[in-house]
Amino acid sequence: MPVQRSERMRFVALTAVMVALVSMLCGCVTNSAHTSRPTPGPLAAAPSPGRLPDTALFRITATAKAHNGAVADLVETVYQPIAPTARDVALLDSQCNYPGVASLKGQPTWESGYPNPLIVATTITSTVRTGSPAWSPDEKVIFYFLGTAAYTGAFTGFEAYCAPGILGVPGTIHGVAPVPGGDPVGGSLGWASRFVSYGFNGGGNYPVTPVVGGDVIVSDCAIQLSAAAKAASTVAAAWAAQPFVSANGCRFSDQSHG
């Protein structure tokens, strides 16, 4: 019996040595507590916005930072007014006219508020930066554009129908908005009127009274204005020197009226 026990002990010891040797050769680790995991690389720098497109009025860039350290770059490019296309009209009809409008006596359509309309278009993008943690859907970014507008792409509604909302991250939005053909710049409905806003905001910018879920802080605001935009509107020209206010995030509007 002692001999058999001794042989079993030698067999167990030899087996343990063989397992350890195989683990060393193949790079395996039997203890899950020591499993190696890839180390995140350094966070990439924000990409250069490049030259402003010839047909653009202005371009806004900003950075969105989430609670978990995720970082996204935000870009909104707004283009000069042009004549509406059939696609523009169809998109505005689908989102900016009340359903069943024929049964609502006296209910106006969007066209009734914009005689001989022109169309201002925007492209809005959000890109999670290389090296960043994944972006959580719970972290919300608000985008701003003209008050009456229709969108396609990565957006969800927020406070009103046919209005700015929540930008998907990562994602791209295309938006179109009417402005009056007689005065597409100022007045009460132009692209540089006192009632419009452009840019971005996050739930963390004004935590005292959060307007949307999440803790995103939008900052690093910058705007590139075309010569045409500066010449057309003193309101737009003033955006280049607009101070950063945390509660506003990167929202550009007529500061003289709040």
Image (spheres, helix red, strand yellow):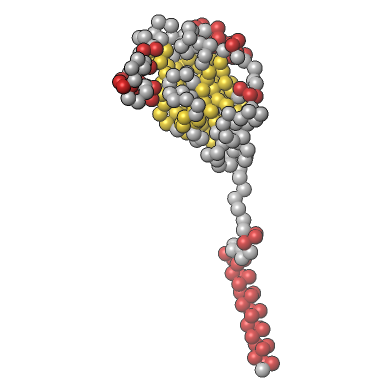
Residue at the location (50% across, 29% down)?
A: 158
Q: In the shown orientation, is residue 234 left or right of residue 102? A: right
- Out of 43 and 87, give the one closest to the viewer: 87
- Out of 31 and 202, give the one closest to the viewer: 202
In the rendered view, would you say 196 is above or below 62?
above
User: In terms of image quadrants, where is residue 150?
Assistant: top left
Q: Position of residue 201 (x, y in %)?
A: 57, 26
Residue at the location (53% across, 28% down)?
A: 142
Q: Position of residue 229 (x, y in %)?
A: 50, 10
Q: Position of residue 45 (x, y in %)?
A: 60, 32
- Quarter of the figure that contains the C terminus: top right
Q: Position of residue 113 (x, y in %)?
A: 39, 12
In the rendered view, would you say 100 is above or below 80?
below
In the rendered view, would you say 104 is above or below 6?
above
Residue at the location (67% across, 89% down)?
A: 5
> Is residue 175 in sight in this rendering?
no
Residue at the location (34% across, 20% down)?
A: 104
Q: In the shown orientation, is residue 93 left or right of residue 46? A: left
- Quarter of the figure that contains the N terminus: bottom right
